[in-house]
Image (cartoon, coloured by chain):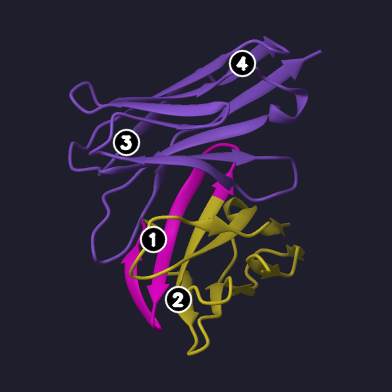
Amino acid sequence: GENVEQHPSTLSVQEGDSAVIKCTYSDSASNYFPWYKQELGKGPQLIIDIRSNVGEKKDQRIAVTLNKTAKHFSLHITETQPEDSAVYFCAASMITGGGNKLTFGTGTQLKVEL
Amino acid sequence: KAGVTQTPRYLIKTRGQQVTLSCSPISGHRSVSWYQQTPGQGLQFLFEYFSETQRNKGNFPGRFSGRQFSNSRSEMNVSTLELGDSALYLCASSLFPRGSEKLFFGSGTQLSVL
């Protein structure tokens, strides 16, 4: 089955700096890669996603890049703010007409310091 | 638009008991998935339902079961509870067929088994 590795497990940055979180996946058939943000006491919230036919996607301060050959994808957050502090999860799945089963990475605790 | 609603928010049970968790998806969403989140194992897929049928199943023992009703609401049941079942149980819903890959999570039910 699919296996997703995520690094680093913790990341501390100064406000205004950039943060990068990296993930690798094992199953070359995976074609969908979402990123989730989880704040304390809440469920994961989808912040950005990318499909395998796209190399990069951007949404304001957040961007995701995908390298299918190397089987890795990354989340980039620019101009970090204190409210970006949370746990971030990457995930991978193979989208078929039969549904969507996500395999998650182990999470990155991001702390944005003032 | 209301989000995914999970009840109850917290549950305390003892070993050997059974428990039923409830999930109401976002209005119009017909697919419901369940995930288990623990500090040690992270987020793991339990099962996915669409149109009252289980479409996918994760690697959990038969003590974990679920069902979906005609109004898309879903329940999951865990029988003969073990200490290791203590976890946050998350429900997610999605549209089908278009946009089915985007999962929207509820805040979860925190189950403690004593």
Asked if labels 2 and 1 share a chain, the reply is: yes
Q: In which quarter of the image is the C terminus of chain B?
A: bottom right
The residue where tag 2 is placed is B30
Task: Name the chain letter of the residue that bears numbered label 2.
Answer: B
Name the residue rendered at 48%, 40% in the picture. Answer: A48
**Residue A33 location, quadrant:** top left
Q: Quick one: which residue is furthest to the front in this view? A: A60
Residue A26, compared with residue B93, is above or below; it is: above
Q: In which quarter of the image is the N terminus of chain B?
A: bottom right
Query: Which chain, by letter, is purple?
Result: A
Asked if labels 1 and 4 share a chain, the reply is: no
Name the residue rendered at 44%, 60% in the picture. Answer: B46
Dot 2, how many residues are within 10 Å of its Cα: few (below 14), some (14-19), or many (20+)? many
Name the residue rendered at 38%, 56% in the picture. Answer: B101
Q: Helix or strand or loop: what does disc 4 sit on?
A: strand
Q: Helix or strand or loop: what does disc 3 sit on?
A: loop
Question: Is residue B21 found inside the magenta-colored segment of the image?
Answer: no
Q: Residue A112 placed where, x, y %?
A: 72, 18
Q: Can residue A2 be seen in this view?
A: yes
Asked if labels 2 and 3 share a chain, the reply is: no
Question: Mark 2 or 4, which is nearer the eye?
Answer: 2
- Which amino acid lies under the numbered mark 1 shown in the image of this protein? Gly
Q: Is residue A110 left or right of residue A104?
A: right
**Residue B9 location, quadrant:** bottom right
Q: Helix or strand or loop: what does disc 2 sit on?
A: loop
Observer-nearest of B54 and B61: B54
- Magenta stretch prevailing secondary structure: strand
- The stretch of residues the image draws in magenta is B37-58
